């Protein structure tokens, strides 16, 4: 998968660091400082071994309030421009809005990460024309209501069928298969059990021929299983990250870059050892 001229997710798992540029993600309350803080966070994630940074200006958490196109542009564009001017690292735009995708790619983003899998009117055309890579994520319902009553007859088969259909639609729209990443969308319209079934059987998604991205970092499934608040979910996040890699994930979207890089590189060192002769 070529993203901003880098080969990612091929010889080792690519680590995508999460960079939220929402007002609540900045500690000093002065949003004027946001692009500088975003750059500082991006520099730290690069030092910690991130392969790509996912910039998002609208919270996609269950129950989150939507923001306008202009508001989202005002958040993400200064951050993307500041980061691309100062450091050389591939950037991803976390948005489902075609206007935001287009502007972010013009400002330097090399991947469109869309939790809506390019289903918004105009999104697939913008993605196709942009020439950049895309991540197609499965969800059931929309962020406001998706966790109310998730329901599937067969969650792995339904997620796989959805992603397969979106891959076909993207290819028909001119997005080559070499530009497509797929994602089961952990926590997006899924119960705890649905998430576990998807993670345990995630290797089945690799049949679709696209690299798989997994986003499990700090998710509420950890709270549901272990009762831990968001700032105490590191160990469980690392455990889920390694299970995802063992089950075929080629990209991991994470908040704790340094710790995830250490865990995954250790895993890969063991799994890549040359065997002794019997
Ligand atoms: C995911 C994601 C979020 C994910 C992809 C959170 C934007 C919620 N989760 N994108 N975004 N996959 N591709 O807890 O799982 O980080 S937001």
Image: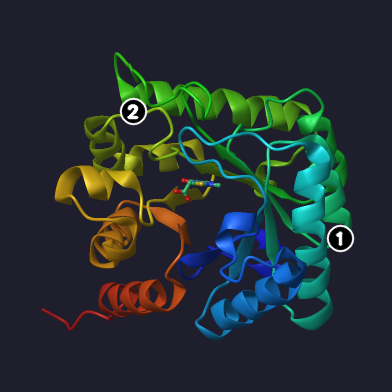
Q: Is residue 182 above or below residue 237?
A: above
Judge by depth and name the residue closer to the eye, 41 or 102: 41
Q: Which residue is rendered at x = 38% and y = 57% of the image?
A: 217
Q: Position of residue 106 (x, y in %)?
A: 89, 55
Identity of the residue furthest to the front in this view: 29
146 or 184, which is in the foreground?
146
Residue 243 position (above or below residue 45): above
Residue at mark 2: 156
Q: Position of residue 239 (x, y in %)?
A: 24, 62
Q: Quadrant of residue 155?
A: top left
Q: Residue at x 18, y 83 (%)?
A: 276
Q: Residue at x 33, y 64 (%)?
A: 231
Say what secondary structure mark 2 lies in: helix
Q: Position of residue 24 (x, y in %)?
A: 57, 56
Q: Secondary structure at mark 1?
A: loop
Left or right: residue 253 versus residue 259 is right
- Which of the marked residues, 2 or 1, is nearer the chain's N terminus? 1
Determine which quarter of the picture holds residue 65: top right
């Amino acid at each position: 998968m070529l993203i901003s001229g880098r080969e990612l997710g091929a010889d080792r798992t690519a680590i995508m660091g999460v960079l939220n540029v929402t007002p609540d993600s900045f500690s000093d309350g002065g949003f004027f400082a946001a692009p500088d803080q975003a750059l500082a966070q991006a520099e730290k994630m690069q030092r910690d071994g991130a392969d790509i940074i996912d910039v998002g200006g609208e919270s996609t958490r269950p129950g989150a309030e939507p923001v306008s196109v202009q508001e989202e542009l005002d958040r993400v564009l200064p951050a993307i421009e500041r980061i691309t001017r100062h450091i050389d690292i591939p950037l991803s735009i976390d948005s489902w809005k075609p206007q935001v995708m287009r502007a972010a790619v013009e400002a330097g983003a090399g991947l469109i990460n869309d939790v809506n899998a390019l289903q918004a009117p105009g999104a697939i055309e913008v993605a196709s024309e942009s020439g950049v890579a895309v991540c197609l994520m499965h969800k059931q319902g929309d962020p406001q209501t998706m966790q109310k009553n998730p329901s599937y007859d067969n969650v792995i088969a339904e997620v796989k069928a959805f992603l397969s259909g979106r891959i076909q639609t993207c290819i028909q729209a001119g997005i080559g298969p070499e530009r497509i990443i797929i994602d089961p969308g952990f926590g997006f319209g899924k119960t705890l059990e649905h998430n576990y079934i998807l993670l345990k059987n995630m290797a089945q998604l690799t049949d679709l021929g696209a690299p798989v991205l997994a986003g499990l970092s700090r998710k509420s499934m950890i709270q549901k299983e272990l009762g831990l608040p968001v700032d105490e979910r590191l160990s469980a996040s690392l455990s889920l990250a390694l299970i995802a890699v063992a089950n075929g994930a080629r990209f991991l979207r994470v908040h704790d870059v340094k710790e995830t890089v250490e865990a995954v590189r250790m895993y890969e060192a063991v799994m890549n050892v040359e065997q002794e002769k019997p």
